[in-house]
Amino acid sequence: MNDPTLIGPCADYEHELVDLHDGALPPERARAVRLHVEHCARCRDWVQAFAALDAQLAADLPQPRLSADFDARLHERLAALSRPAARGHPLGTLDLEREHDALLAALRSGARRKALLGAIGAAAAAVCVFIAARDLLQDMGGVLAAAPGGTEPWMVFSAVGVAVAIAGLAWSAARNGLPLPG
């Protein structure tokens, strides 16, 4: 494992040597790695070269600096997040939620009112059509009586039409296509 033709530290210790340099190894493992470095010239040379490179980089690279008022601004922003938001403030989520709920309630109420008026109008139109059809059938009683089968097929046809209309309304209401009051 300590072949002098190999470059770098021993493969078993490569990552631990970096962690040792950064101070990230647990104390017992750090002692074992230091003991290995004392007895392994290859790892010792690598640790020294790594430490020199790290020191050179630290000296040559610019160090980021925070503004003088950074701490004060940070504490101010954290305090603002913990305060309840004022009305009209972008963080006034409670006000926004109330407004949202009020708008939804108004929309639901309007939809129910519109559906109810539409249903009343459709029922009134259907009643008018049935009254007109009844009167028309009575006036044409003689003609229908002369037709093959008499008036019974017309009545069956009318009853089927009414049943289909009621089934369509029920299906629409079941699928929330017809908002009902309440």
Image (tube, rainbow, N blue to C red):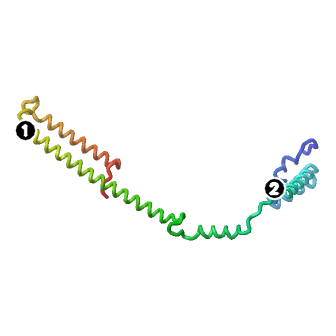
Foreground pick, 150 / 57: 57
Question: In what quadrant of the picture does the C terminus appear?
Answer: bottom left
Foreground pick, 85 / 143: 85
Disc 2 marks a residue whose amino acid type is Asp
Task: Calculate the distance from the C-alpha at mark 2 to the C-alpha at mark 1.
Answer: 104 Å
- Residue 169 seen in render: yes
Disc 1 marks a residue whose amino acid type is Asp
**Quadrant of the rendered image containing residue 141:** top left
Foreground pick, 39 / 71: 71
* Nearer to us: label 2 or label 1: 1
Vertically, is 80 above or below 16? below
Q: Do the residues labelled 2 and 1 touch (CB within 8 Å)?
A: no
Q: Is residue 89 left or right of residue 8?
A: left
**What residue is shown at x 93% (from left), y 55% (from top)?**
38
* Residue on which disc 1 sits: 139
Where residue 24 appears, as percent x and y from the top left, is 79, 59
Where residue 79 appears, as percent x and y from the top left, is 62, 70
Where residue 155 appears, as percent x and y from the top left, is 14, 38
The furthest residue to the top: 148
- Within 10 Å of disc 2 (Cα), the crowding (few <14, some 14-19, many 20+) is some
Question: In what quadrant of the picture does the N terminus appear?
Answer: top right
Secondary element at tag 2? helix
- Residue 32 seen in render: no
**What residue is shown at x 9% (from left), y 30% (from top)?**
147
**What residue is shown at x 44% (from left), y 64% (from top)?**
98
Secondary element at tag 1? helix
N-terminal-most mark, 2 or 1:
2
Looking at the rendered structure, which numbered label has been put on residue 19? 2
**What residue is shown at x 92% (from left), y 49% (from top)?**
42
